[in-house]
């Protein structure tokens, strides 16, 4: 019986310790939201190569390995706010993550930008956090007593600010925008400065790649020209998507540095005719991943 106990300790406890040692290495989390973005990372980072290990936690796939000399964990979070927040918190709780980076696509809301261009905003806001009010019959709306109007409305839709809490705070407080980490922004600026002209894989034109400004996130796929103009008017938003502010929000609460790279797959309703996302999501995903690789090299 004694020998069996020793064998049990050797076969069970030792592997756990070894796994713990591996998991304890500081990691940079690299996120994407849906298959075209993950496909770009699998292709460009070689996630299916023997050097990467794959783990599933609650259905999410996590790839651990080395990219640009950095220890990383890569995960596809799923689309939309709830999936993004859930996957982000799960990643932070299960892995020793020091920084979080995202690469993927978005709809362009800045009229100066075109499909394929890449933006790296310095702050993120929720555009669909709002109140919907009845018309008052006089060209306005009947606002609830609690509501304080802080932004221009879009018809019955009155934007509001998210509340958030973090370590050291006793109460939830309004957070108009969630900031990107200054150190990561500096690395992004260095990386973009060293890239030189980058040609779009599909369009062949030289892409605009810019750091700064605001990105917005909502629980809707934005494909409406009038609302696109509203988003740019209110937030001067460079792009709109369905996940990034949720990542930034979770990182804000956890005190983890965050940055997102978004390449434009469409114009969020600013186009003529049918939205072009199906034609450009794959190549724009590659554009975003190429810029993310350059940023990793700067860290």
Image (tube, rainbow, N blue to C red):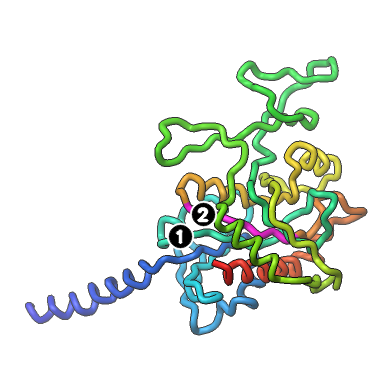
- Residue 266 pos. (x, y %): 80, 57
Real-space CA distance between mark 2 and mark 1, rounded to the nearest whole angstrom: 7 Å
Apparent side of residue 46 relative to residue 166 in the rendered image (left or right): right
Q: For the C terminus, give its image quadrant.
A: bottom right
Q: For the N terminus, give its image quadrant.
A: bottom left
Residue at 85% x, 19% y is 139
Residue at 36% x, 72% y is 22
What is the residue that sits farthest to the right in this orientation? 272
- Answer whether labels 2 and 1 touch (C-beta < 8 Å): yes
Apparent side of residue 201 relative to residue 131 in the rendered image (left or right): right
- Position of 18 relative to 124 (above/below): below
Which residue bears the numbered disc 1? 98
Secondary structure of the residue carrying tag 1 is: strand
- Residue 179 pos. (x, y %): 58, 46
Q: Nearer the viewer, residue 113 or 115?
A: 113
Whether residue 83 is visible here, answered yes or no, is no
How packed is label 2: few (under 14 Cα within 10 Å), some, or many (20 or more)?
A: many
Q: Nearer the viewer, residue 170 or 76?
A: 170
What secondary structure is the magenta-colored segment mainly? Answer: strand
- Residue 279 pos. (x, y %): 82, 66
Residue at 73% x, 40% y is 235
Which residue bears the numbered disc 2? 257
Apparent side of residue 67 relative to residue 254 in the rendered image (left or right): right
Q: Quadrant of residue 136?
A: top right
Does the magenta segment cover residue 197? no
Residue 107 — which label? none
How packed is label 1: few (under 14 Cα within 10 Å), some, or many (20 or more)?
A: some
In magenta, the rendered stretch is: 256-263
What is the residue that sits farthest to the left in this orientation? 2
Q: Nearer the viewer, residue 149 or 120?
A: 120
Apparent side of residue 112 relative to residue 105 in the rendered image (left or right): right
What is the residue that sits farthest to the bottom in this orientation? 50
């Amino acid at each position: 019986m004694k020998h069996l106990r020793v064998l049990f300790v050797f076969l069970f406890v030792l592997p756990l310790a070894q796994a713990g040692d591996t998991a304890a290495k500081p990691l940079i989390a690299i996120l994407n939201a849906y298959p075209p973005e993950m496909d770009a990372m699998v292709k460009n980072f070689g996630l299916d190569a023997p050097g990467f290990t794959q783990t599933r936690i609650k259905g999410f796939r996590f790839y651990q390995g080395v990219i640009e000399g950095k220890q990383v964990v890569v995960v596809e979070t799923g689309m939309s706010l709830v999936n993004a927040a859930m996957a982000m918190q799960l990643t932070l709780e299960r892995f020793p993550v020091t920084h979080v980076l995202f690469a993927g696509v978005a709809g362009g809301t800045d009229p100066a930008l075109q499909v394929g261009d890449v933006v790296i905003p310095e702050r993120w806001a929720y555009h669909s956090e709002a109140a919907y009010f009845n018309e008052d019959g006089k060209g306005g709306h009947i606002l609830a007593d609690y509501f304080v109007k802080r932004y221009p409305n879009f018809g019955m839709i009155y934007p509001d600010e998210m509340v958030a809490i973090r370590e050291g705070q006793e109460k939830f407080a309004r957070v108009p925008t969630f900031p990107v980490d200054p150190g990561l922004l500096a690395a992004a600026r260095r990386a973009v400065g060293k890239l030189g002209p980058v040609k779009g894989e599909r369009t062949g034109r030289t892409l605009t790649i810019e750091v700064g400004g605001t990105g917005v996130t909502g629980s809707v796929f934005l494909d409406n020209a009038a609302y696109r103009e509203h988003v740019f008017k209110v937030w001067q938003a460079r792009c709109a998507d369905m996940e990034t502010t949720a990542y930034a929000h979770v990182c804000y609460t956890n005190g983890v540095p965050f940055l997102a790279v978004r390449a434009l797959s469409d114009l969020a309703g600013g186009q003529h005719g049918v939205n072009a996302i199906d034609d450009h999501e794959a190549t724009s995903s590659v554009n975003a991943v190429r810029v993310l690789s350059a940023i990793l090299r700067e860290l």
